[in-house]
Image: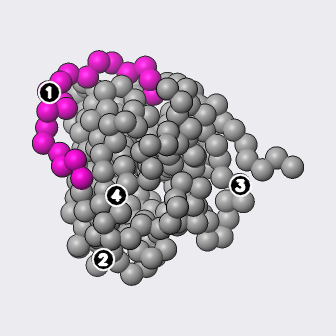
Amino acid sequence: MQLIRPIFMLMILGSSIFVPDSIHAKAIPDTIPVYGTNDFIPDGKGSHPAWNKAAWHDLQKIDTTATDYTAKFRILYSAEGVYVLMQGTDRILTSPFDEDFEELYLADVYEVFFHPDPSFPVYFEYEISAKEKELVLIIPNKDGRLTGWQPWRYEGNRKVVKKTSIMQSSKGMTGWIAEMFFPYRLLSPLLSQPPVASTVWNANFCRLDYDSGGMIKWSWSPIRRNFHEYRVFRSIRFE
């Protein structure tokens, strides 16, 4: 029986242009706090009061382009998993995929990376489109040689709980939101135990957008060319 199925990822994320040093000189904290909460059900709008205790953190646009979109995220944790809320401005929905586990990185997506053990070159990657389609992977990264592995029996309390919504004005679409809950049961291959106060993980939060005709990237961590530069992931500290 085939327990897990490998996906050999397209290395399109490694083909971006050079990034000026000025982009990486912006003051972004190396470690941010993650505050605890009781569990709640994501509604795709971030309307639960628990989010009031979590600060917004901006993503930095990596590629030089006329696109003026912005992106940001919030993060919380509970006894059962980690919550992430991502929001960005947008005027066009570029997403041809209508199924989960397709090549969503070729569409407008938000991405979340968790790397609980930085000494081990294997981390979790999650992509979600505005159509609420997802790609869930464990990534072994051996000196830049990537292989993506999908979870086996991705069901029940091992699934990411996710919800998206489109922001609108009288002139049309103004952006989109994704709210996600990542259960520790799904992340268990990377965890010796769930996080407690003072636990530190490395992580990154990213965005891809194709409205300008090509791939435009945003990242919280100071990457230069692609989202898999895990050695520069910033840290999150559970409080």
- Seen in the picture, residue 177 relative to 28 is either above or below; the reply is below
Q: Position of residue 109 (x, y in %)?
A: 44, 44
Please report whichever mark, 1 or 4, sits nearer to the chain's N-terminal start.
1
Judging by the rendered image, the residue that carries numbered circle 1 is 22
Please tell me whether residue 19 belongs to the stretch shown in magenta: yes
- Please name the residue shown 59% across and 55% down the image: 189
Pointers 4 and 2 in contact (C-beta within 8 Å) = no
Question: Is residue 124 in view?
Answer: yes
Please report whichever mark, 4 or 2, sits nearer to the chain's N-terminal start.
2
Q: Which numbered marker is on residue 200?
A: 4
Q: Secondary structure at mark 1?
A: helix
**Magenta span of residues:** 13-31
Q: Secondary structure at mark 2?
A: helix
Please report whichever mark, 1 or 3, sits nearer to the chain's N-terminal start.
1
Q: Is residue 134 left or right of residue 223?
A: right
- Tell me which amino acid carries mark 1: Ser
Q: Is residue 72 left or right of residue 143?
A: left
Q: CA distance from mark 1 to mark 3?
A: 42 Å
Q: Secondary structure at mark 4?
A: strand
Q: Which numbered marker is on residue 50?
A: 2
- Seen in the picture, residue 175 relative to 85 is either above or below; the reply is above
Judging by the rendered image, the residue that carries numbered circle 3 is 152
Its colouring scheme is one colour
- Tell me which amino acid carries mark 3: Trp
Disc number lying in front (2 or 3): 3
Please report whichever mark, 2 or 3, sits nearer to the chain's N-terminal start.
2
Question: Is residue 163 in view?
Answer: no
